[in-house]
Image (spheres, rainbow, N blue to C red):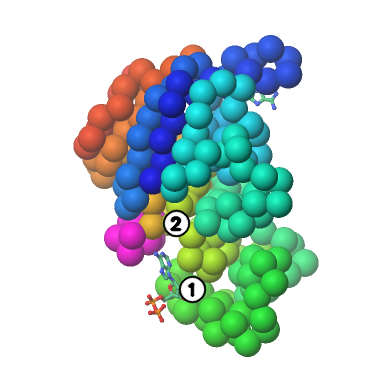
């Protein structure tokens, strides 16, 4: 589903964030991206989301080259990806329901579709009973569940999660990891950057370790290793 061929990213300040990366990801994989701060994890996510363009090499997403994608095609591409952030990034003036609905509104979904699609994803993340709560009235773990509901409501092929448990306590983090695994078991590919050694070492998913913009390790059933 995703292929990186000799991909390099140099930012305008001449920082080489990733360097000559070749990588293949199949549909349905669950991948932990690990590595010290500055290793290039976020850059990989930004390249996939077309927030940044590669400086060299090729990224093929579902058979299409991202560098050849036209500007007007980018919104459609982004709709196939759900993003989950460390700091949740919910809209504070909107309720849980409205935050999830908003992800559909921006795609131009009709009102009746929104009414039909929001309840089952709130149910899936276990927060249908808090549909009318505002983010400030929810715990961190609950806010992240809404972040996940928003990410999946468009039925994406890929979830990019950038340290989704980074601000949460261990028990809450584990609850969220169970949810991510449920979503993955429904066929959604997940790429998650994380510094949580315990989670990575317990779940034994594919681990791609980055160091200085290069792949230091790529292992099926991998471990966190010495990457901090
Ligand atoms: P990680 O997510 O692993 O912490 P990043 O991909 O954010 O790593 O960063 C990789 C390198 O690129 C770092 O040296 C970082 O300072 C640099 N970098 C990231 N984003 C930018 C940017 N927008 N402009 C300039 N340099 C950047
Ligand atoms: P249905 O067959 O009616 O779509 P599902 O049980 O498959 O019911 O889905 C229930 C909800 O979960 C739907 O609203 C859908 O948006 C969401 N959903 C569907 N597929 C996935 C998936 N791969 N990952 C996460 N959520 C999904």
Q: Secondary structure at mark 1?
A: helix
Task: Decide if residue 100 is in sight here.
Answer: yes
Q: Position of residue 138 (x, y in %)?
A: 60, 65
Asked if the beta carbon under badge 1 is closer than 8 A to the nearest atom of ligand 2, the reply is: yes
Question: Residue 49, image x and y in percent?
Answer: 58, 43
Between circles 2 and 1, the one closer to the viewer is 2
User: How many numbered tags mark residues here?
Assistant: 2
Query: Vertically, is 121 above or below 53?
Result: below
Query: In the image, what residue occupies the spot 74% across and 62% down?
Result: 92
Describe the element under mark 2 as helix, strand or loop: loop
Q: Nearer the viewer, residue 85 or 7?
A: 7
In this rendering, is residue 32 above or below 209?
below
Q: Main secondary structure of the magenta part?
A: helix
Q: Are marks 2 and 1 in contact (CB under 8 Å)?
A: no
Q: Residue at x 22, y 37 (%)?
A: 221
For disc 2, the neighbor class at 10 Å (few under 14, some 14 to 19, many from 20) is: some
Q: Residues within 10 Å of mark 1 (few under 14, many from 20)?
A: many
Residue segment shown in magenta: 178-187
Magenta stretch containing residue 126, yes or no? no
Give the quadrant of the C terminus.
top left
Q: Which residue is tagged 1?
A: 121
The residue sitting at 25% across, 30% down in the picture is 219
Residue 177 in sight in this render: no
Ranked by sequence position, the earlier of labels 2 and 1 is 1
Q: Position of residue 185 (x, y in %)?
A: 30, 60
- Residue assigned mark 2: 157
Judging depth in this view, the residue of 92 and 124 nearest the camera is: 124
Q: Nearer the viewer, residue 219 or 107?
A: 107
Is 185 included in the stretch rendered in magenta? yes
Q: Label 2 vs label 1: CA separation?
A: 16 Å
The quadrant in which residue 140 appears is: bottom right
């Amino acid at each position: 589903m995703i292929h990186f061929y000799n991909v390099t990213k140099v930012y305008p300040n001449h920082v080489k964030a990733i360097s000559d990366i070749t990588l293949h990801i199949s549909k349905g994989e669950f991948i932990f991206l690990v590595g010290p701060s500055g290793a290039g994890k976020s850059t990989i996510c930004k390249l996939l989301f077309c927030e940044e363009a590669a400086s060299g090499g090729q990224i093929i997403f579902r058979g299409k080259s991202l560098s050849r994608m036209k500007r007007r095609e980018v919104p459609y591409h982004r709709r196939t990806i759900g993003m989950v952030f460390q700091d949740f990034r919910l809209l504070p003036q909107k309720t849980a329901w409205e935050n999830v609905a908003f992800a559909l509104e921006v795609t131009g979904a009709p009102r009746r579709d929104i009414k039909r699609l929001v309840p089952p994803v709130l149910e899936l993340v276990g927060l249908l009973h808090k549909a009318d709560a505002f983010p400030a009235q929810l715990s961190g773990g609950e806010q992240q569940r809404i972040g996940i509901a928003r990410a999946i409501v468009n039925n994406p092929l890929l979830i990019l999660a950038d340290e989704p448990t980074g601000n949460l306590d261990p028990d809450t983090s584990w609850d969220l990891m169970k949810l991510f695994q449920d979503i993955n078991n429904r066929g959604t590919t997940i790429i998650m950057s994380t510094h949580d050694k315990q989670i990575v070492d317990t779940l034994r998913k594919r681990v791609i370790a980055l160091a200085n913009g290069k792949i230091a390790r790529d292992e099926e059933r991998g471990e966190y290793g010495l990457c901090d």
